[in-house]
Image (spheres, grey):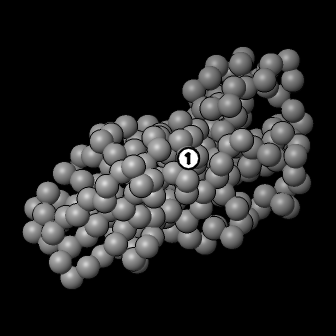
Amino acid sequence: MERLKNARKAKGFTQEKLASLVSVSRQAYSSYETGTRDPDTRTLSQIAINLDVSVDYLLGKVTQSQTESNRMIPLLGSVPAGVPIEAIEDVEEYIDIYPRFVKHGELFALRVQGDSMEPDLRNGDIVIVEKQEFVENGDVAVVRVNGEDVTLKRVKLTNKGLMLIPSNPAYDPVFFDSDQVATLPVTIIGKVIEIRRRL
């Protein structure tokens, strides 16, 4: 992969250095540059993030000029109701975001699990989330409950508390009064700013 070699040299990395950064042997990495072996998806994502280029650039799908304004963000796992927060802290892979999101704050991606947000969000969809503590009424947000569990729901704010609303009518909304919001606690992790559906 000539682009891989050029991107590595532009970054000033030796093969040994980059191999160490992505946790593969130097021999394995060398085989990627010579084209005798292809890196797996996770390794390719890690290489791209360390070289400040996109996976599409390394694969020859776009030119460097098209990727200069891109960012890569971590896909952290799945987020339904009732999943421990630790479950979304392991990075599965890194994914590209569109240039219009480059100037946003801290971003991460999550995989939707379950059907409580159908038809708006389906099982397996990827959501891009901007980390923030506050959202507006009607925003879909990632919310932490009890300090441990996370859920993906539409948020309705009132002067009496906070309601988490599923899109699927088979599920009931859950209301937390102001005292519960403070003591459980119930906190906003971030706002969904993009949905990606893998067909």
Residue 108, given in percent of the width and then of the height, sits at 51, 54
Image point (80%, 19%), residue name: 37
Q: Quadrant of the N terminus?
A: top right
Q: Which residue is mark 1?
A: 122
Relative to 89, 11 lies left or right: right
Amino acid type at image mark 1: Arg
Observer-nearest residue: 18 or 83? 83
Relative to 75, 37 lies left or right: right
Image point (72%, 17%), residue name: 27
Observer-nearest residue: 25 or 172? 172
Relative to 57, 160 lies left or right: left
Crowding at label 1, few (<14), some or many (≥20) Cα neighbours within 10 Å?
some
Q: Quadrant of residue 188?
A: bottom left
Residue 31 appears in the picture as rendered: yes
- Identify whether 145 is placed above or below 190: above
Q: Quadrant of residue 80?
A: top left
- Label 1: state its secondary structure: loop
- Identify whether 113 is placed above or below 180: above
Residue 48, given in percent of the width and then of the height, sits at 69, 43
The number of numbered badges drawn on the structure is 1
Residue 88, given in percent of the width and then of the height, sits at 40, 42
Residue 29, given in percent of the width and then of the height, sits at 72, 24
Residue farthest toward the front in the current orientation of the protein = 170
